[in-house]
């Protein structure tokens, strides 16, 4: 029995009986201030008296337990009591000292019955100051890096924008590098990012509409669009979807992208993300809508289509022949990375009559001592290549590049020497990997890598017939997909076919007279019919 009891104690979990040991409760319902609970009783409006406001703020922010929360008590004109609240590290100390506290302590005498408007106009010497009647608005501003001033006898708090937390400087794009065009990329600061776009689009019609995502995190962002170009229904749809997100916490813009896409289980991404302000500006000028949030160095562009994902930001800055050449190369790279392994498998297994005789002898001799079928061989090498790529990404940059090169060379040479794979298979995998690196959008590269495995399996079962079936089904799925009301294969899958050529190839810049008609913009004209008036011969 003792042996049985010992085995039972090892295999069956039981709550410790000792009262001295800590036991984590399953639930805890005695939270005094939970912003997710709608039934918590909280005062709606700011109190008029100094003591009531101070007591509530200390309780709400767990002061002095909250070590980085600061309450600075002041005495203004005629010993009027006031206090300032902010989070240390989120505000600029010099701004608070010189632009707020110092003027408050040196103000001249004003009337005893001063109201909030008089305080705002005569007392506060800060350029971005507003008064808030509701506690929640004040607390949201403080949590976002502002400071708030409470004055005795005033039933409002003054919100002062003094945000100055640490952030990265503006750097070059990492994922969307280009030899041409601007070299600026987004950072994690919301206002810096919106300013980068506004610096390019110098128009008052560029709207930066504020929004908040996450009931607890309250991540701030801006919805950007040009009011006299973007379709109002598109703007409303983007706004409604973002406002309908009811999750508690949102930390990155990639999470918002996952919450906004229509078909979660589709392999291909339905929303374009970019780290380049110039690409966002160009999209806005076409009538699209963009979203930027605080804390993320990327922007989302709505809507997008399959062709837009294959475009590169450098296409707009290259001459017409060069840009089209790069697009053709990217199209070829797409077909290579998707279909080359499947084509090789289909030809060697089912359609040997397509191979020249001497090449067939060479392939047969190379595979003579390989113990695995071609399908297994191809899957093993694809998996190994993806493993090396993933390991290179996770390792530090200097080590990652070395790991990818050395690992690929050693693994390929060792596999051929051990007769696990044929040399021709190494060549096929290498060309396929190079083609996958030629994609302009990283998320699109993910979809290519996943679809490639599907095509390999289909080709292994039925050769070209399986590949044709896979291409047909994938085209049908893409054709049925939409991005914010726009068909994903627009303009091919749309009844408006004025931009098919421009979607596939680059037109000369002087021929871009119309904006994409599938966006149904308010103003479809991008430029006049004759944009190079210097070409017009002057009549003598």
Image (tube, rainbow, N blue to C red):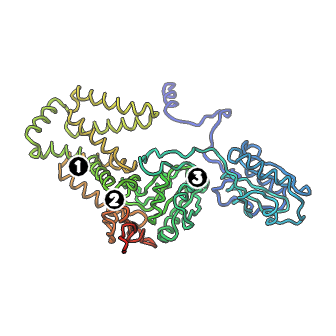
Q: Nearer the viewer, mark 1 or mark 2?
A: 2
- Along the horizontal axis of the image, is 4 left or right of 321? right
Find residue 157 and report its horizontal and vertical position in percent.
76, 60
- Which one is earlier in the sequence, the residue at label 2 or at label 3? 3
Q: Nearer the viewer, mark 3 or mark 1?
A: 3
Q: Nearer the viewer, mark 2 or mark 3?
A: 2
Residue 535, by quadrant, is bottom left
Alpha carbon distance from label 3 to label 1: 49 Å
Q: Give SS at disc 3.
A: helix
- Give the vertical position of 278 relative to 15 (above or below): below
Give the mark count. Answer: 3
- Along the horizontal axis of the image, is 219 left or right of 318? right
Quadrant into which the C terminus falls: bottom left
- Give the vertical position of 535 relative to 172 (above or below): below
Write down the residue under mark 3. Answer: 192
Write down the residue under mark 1. Answer: 458
């Amino acid at each position: 029995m003792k042996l049985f009891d010992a085995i039972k104690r090892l295999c069956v979990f039981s709550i410790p009986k000792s009262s001295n040991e800590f036991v984590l409760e399953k639930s805890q319902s005695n939270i005094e201030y939970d912003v997710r609970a709608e039934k918590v009783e909280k005062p709606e409006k700011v109190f008029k008296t100094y003591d009531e406001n101070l007591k509530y703020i200390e309780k709400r922010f767990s002061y002095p337990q909250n070590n980085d929360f600061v309450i600075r008590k002041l005495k203004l004109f005629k010993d009027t009591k006031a206090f300032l609240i902010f989070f240390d590290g989120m505000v600029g100390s010099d701004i608070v000292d010189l632009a707020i506290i110092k003027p408050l302590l040196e103000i001249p005498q004003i009337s005893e019955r001063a109201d909030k408007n008089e305080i705002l106009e005569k007392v506060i010497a800060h350029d971005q100051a507003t008064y808030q009647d509701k506690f929640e608005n004040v607390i949201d501003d403080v949590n976002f890096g502002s400071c708030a001033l409470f004055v005795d006898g005033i039933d409002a708090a003054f919100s002062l924008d003094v945000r100055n937390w640490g952030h990265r400087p503006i750097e070059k794009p990492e994922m969307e590098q280009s030899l041409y065009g601007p070299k600026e990329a987004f950072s994690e600061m919301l206002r810096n990012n919106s300013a980068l776009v506004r610096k390019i689009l110098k128009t008052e019609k560029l709207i930066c509409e504020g929004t908040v995502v996450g009931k607890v995190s309250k991540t701030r962002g801006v919805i950007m669009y040009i009011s006299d170009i973007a379709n109002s229904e598109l703007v409303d749809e983007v706004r409604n979807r973002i406002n309908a997100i009811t999750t508690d916490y949102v930390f990155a813009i990639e999470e918002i992208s996952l919450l906004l896409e229509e078909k979660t289980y589709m392999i291909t991404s339905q929303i374009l993300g970019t780290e380049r302000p110039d690409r966002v500006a160009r999209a806005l000028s076409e009538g699209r809508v963009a979203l930027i949030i605080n804390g993320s160095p990327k922007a989302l562009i709505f809507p997008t289509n399959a062709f837009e994902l294959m475009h590169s930001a450098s296409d707009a800055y290259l001459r017409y022949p060069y840009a089209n050449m790069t697009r053709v190369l990217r199209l070829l790279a797409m077909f290579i990375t998707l279909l080359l392994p499947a084509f090789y498998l289909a030809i060697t297994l089912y359609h040997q009559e397509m191979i020249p005789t001497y090449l067939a002898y060479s392939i047969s001799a190379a595979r003579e001592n390989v113990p695995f079928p071609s399908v297994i061989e191809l899957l093993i090498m694809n998996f190994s290549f993806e493993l090396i790529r993933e390991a290179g990404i996770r390792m530090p940059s200097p080590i990652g590049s070395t790991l990818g090169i050395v690992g690929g060379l050693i693994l390929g040479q060792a596999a051929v020497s051990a007769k696990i794979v044929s040399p021709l298979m190494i060549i096929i995998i290498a060309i396929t990997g190079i083609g996958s690196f030629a994609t302009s959008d990283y998320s699109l590269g993910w979809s290519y890598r996943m679809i490639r495995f599907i095509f390999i399996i289909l080709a292994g079962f039925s050769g070209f017939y399986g590949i044709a079936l896979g291409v047909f089904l994938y085209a049908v799925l893409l054709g049925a997909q939409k991005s914010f009301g726009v068909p994903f294969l627009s303009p091919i899958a749309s009844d408006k076919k004025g931009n098919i050529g421009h979607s596939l190839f680059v037109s000369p810049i002087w021929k871009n007279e119309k904006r994409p008609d599938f966006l149904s913009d308010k103003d479809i004209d991008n430029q006049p019919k004759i944009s190079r008036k210097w070409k017009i011969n002057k009549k003598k």
